[in-house]
Amino acid sequence: EVQLVESGGGLVQAGGSLRLSCTASGHTSDDDSIAWFRQAPGKEREGVSCISSSDGRTYYAASVKGRFTVSSNNAKNTVYLQMNSLKPEDTAVYYCASDPYCSGTGVYWGQGTQVTVSS
């Protein structure tokens, strides 16, 4: 089992930046890529980004491409989501999850962190 803990959410003005962190512990494997998802009130959860644990490839939703950057520090078992040029529509609870092969299916989930972007 993998435990995931997110941090770094908060309130920011439109155009600002935040960096989210996701620290993993427990039994991790080469298959345990880490993805970021988000869910806004009244909306379905959507995939935001993923970083492959096997080759480091990164994936982004069209809505965040060019503004968000996912990276990892393997020594710290931590994945980061740098979010720049934030928009009010980025407001959501952000979750990290283990996502084998960045398939878009989360297996183990963190507790979520709130990101609020004011206009």
Image: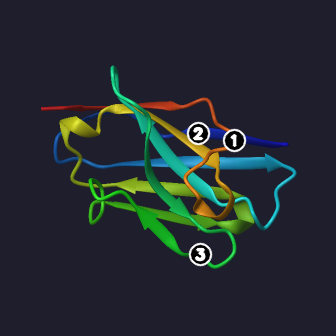
On screen, residue 102 above or below 110: below
**Which residue is the extreme one toward the bottom?**
55
Name which residue type carries label 2: Glu
Q: Dot 3 lies on which element? A: loop
Q: Can residue 10 be seen in this view?
A: yes
Residue in front for this viewpoint, 47 or 87? 47
Which residue corresponds to the image point at 54% horizontal and 31% vertical from the top-left? 112
Point out which mark residue 6 bears. 2
Q: Do the residues bearing badges 2 and 3 touch, measured as CB atoms within 8 Å?
A: no
23 on left or right of 112: right
Q: Dot 1 lies on which element? A: strand
> For the C terminus, which image quadrant?
top left
On screen, residue 75 above or below 94: below
Name which residue type carries label 3: Gly
- The residue singled out by tag 3 in the image is 56
Q: Do the residues bearing badges 2 and 1 touch, measured as CB atoms within 8 Å?
A: yes
Name which residue type carries label 1: Leu
- The residue singled out by tag 1 in the image is 4
Residue in front for this viewpoint, 114 or 65? 65
Q: Position of residue 96 (x, y in %)?
A: 57, 44
Q: Which of marks 2 and 3 is in front?
A: 3
Which residue corresponds to the image point at 44% horizontal and 35% vertical from the top-left? 45
